[in-house]
Amino acid sequence: MRILGEIVLQYRRTVIGVFLCFMPVTGMGASQNQYEPGYSIQRTNELVNIDGMLSESIWNEVPVATGFWMSYPVDDRKAEAKMQTEVRLTADDQFLYIGVVCYGPQDYVIKTLKRDAEFKDGDGFGVVLDPVNEKTNGFVFGVNPAGVQTELLVTGQVGRRQDLEPGRLPRGINIAWDNKWFTEVTNHPDRWIAEIAIPFKTLRFDDTKKTWGVNFFRLDARSNSIHTWSPVPIEFNEFDLGYTGELLWGTPPAKTKRNLAIIPYARTSISKDYETADPVAYDFQAGLDAKIPVTSSLNLDMTLNSDFSQVEVDEQVINLTLFDIRLPEKRIFFLENSDIFEDFGIPPMRPFFSRKIGLDEDGNPIPILYGARLSGNVNKDLRIGLMNLQTRETDDFLSQNYTVFSFHQQVLARSVVKGYFHNRAAIGNENPDYNRNMGLEFQYRSEDGRFQTFGGLGKSFSPGLKSKDYFYSSGIGYDNRNISVYSNLSGLGKNYKADLGYIRGQEYYDAIRDT
């Protein structure tokens, strides 16, 4: 059995790893209940032209959200007056409109013009939306002074602020999600202005909810500071769903026209080897992908003879470690609500990793014949994910069928009970060839996000393996402005198998740590 923790040791040793991180001591700071602002949105019948000018009359009639607070590097004061931010919102039947004025000198820091690339390394503005207002999952839309867009999916398990190496994102963040929304930016000597239009059909929301969670944040790279409209303590990220304010609707937005998308494809090729006498070879393939809204918060993805040739290639990584690299998923079919399927286990051990389906160990595609994926909110507290895919037999791999089911049931304010079942079964093998996994987890998080504890137990089922096929994890943590304490205890049986998961080493010998 292998024991996992902040310190990792082998040979059946029980280890508790404790990590202490001391932060600079400042004033009292902001707390979750100290100040929760609200914004009453007004609808408009006026045509809003997204040009970065805010010239429509509605922008002079709606309330102004301002008075931003510092969130980093201190959180006990308002942002400087010369660096304040003004935000205005309005809406019609199709779009949520956001008008932003960011005051400050024009020497902006813009490190890249690539979409979704290291948004926090330069100047920028972002809006956090929690349409269900349950603090479990939401959306982030960001733009910089050059008009470069960034969008993220976030969950309620983002956790504390951390200094991460370049390219690494906090837990609970999915930057691979992309959607269509509109921005225009204009620059002026003492400010930059952004005008944003977000289609309601890109959001999953409850049309009976009159209160959404919302926050706005401003990134100022010159002063290395982050400002937020609703105060966020220094130890938490600016997109933490536990610290949003309220977006108040007199009449909630109605369900929009269903965002049904059907994407067919056809591909043909002709080849001939002139050095041999082989005849001309013809190849033709066709298929389609479909995205079907079942409800405003539940979505069905379907694929037939999948083609992922348009997917962004993986970043090239030189691996000098003992372990496989866990590259991010970029295939659109697997992205939406991916946390429902993947947010189990601990970072060295994840029972489910979608790149194990349709890709070999080197990232080369294995043909997927068909698949369906249902995911989203059944109600305000229950999220489910159900997926089934069938791969084609190749010279190197048998045909495989994959079934995945998971659920997240919210309890209390920010806690969740969740479970999963995974099945991989080979087709056409004379001998039994399958792997099944099931597990149950509980995560408790206090309403202010500072105290958290978790526990989980998983078991695998494989032919010929009847014992030591378990995985367990538990942990407890506390964060405040001055100290962060985290402890965990996890174990992995030597016969535990997760063919659909990611295990960072199992039953290996580490001479450095064996002291």
Image: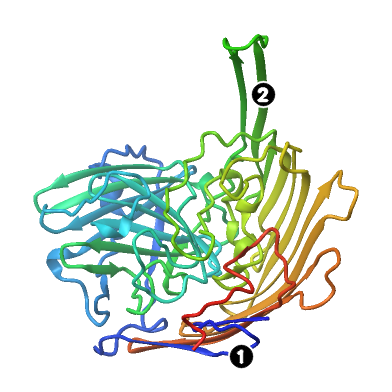
Q: Position of residue 126 (x, y in %)?
A: 34, 57
Q: Is residue 485 above or below residue 195?
A: below
Residue type for callout 1 = Thr
Write down the residue under mark 1: 14
Check disc 2: other Cα within 10 Å, few if <14, some if 14-19, many if 20+: few
Give the mark toward the camera: 2 or 1.
Answer: 1
Q: Residue at x 46, y 85 (%)?
A: 450
Give how far apart the Cα atoms at labels 2 and 1 are.
54 Å
Q: Is residue 324 above or below residue 94?
A: below
Q: Position of residue 91 (x, y in %)?
A: 42, 48
Q: Position of residue 436 (x, y in %)?
A: 79, 63
Q: In the figure, residue 81 lies in which quadrant?
A: bottom left
Q: Can the viewer see residue 229?
A: yes
Q: Is residue 254 above or below residue 380?
A: above
Give the left or right position of residue 243, taking residue 331 as reference.
left
Give the left or right position of residue 261, taking residue 222 as reference.
right
Checking the image for residue 285, the label placed there is 2
**Helix, strand, or loop for circle 2?**
strand
Q: Position of residue 216 (x, y in %)?
A: 34, 63
Quadrant housing the N terminus: bottom right
Of residues 60 and 461, which is closer to you in this image?
461
**Helix, strand, or loop for circle 1?**
loop
Q: In the figure, residue 163 lies in which quadrant?
A: bottom left
Of residues 97 and 19, which is closer to you in this image?
19
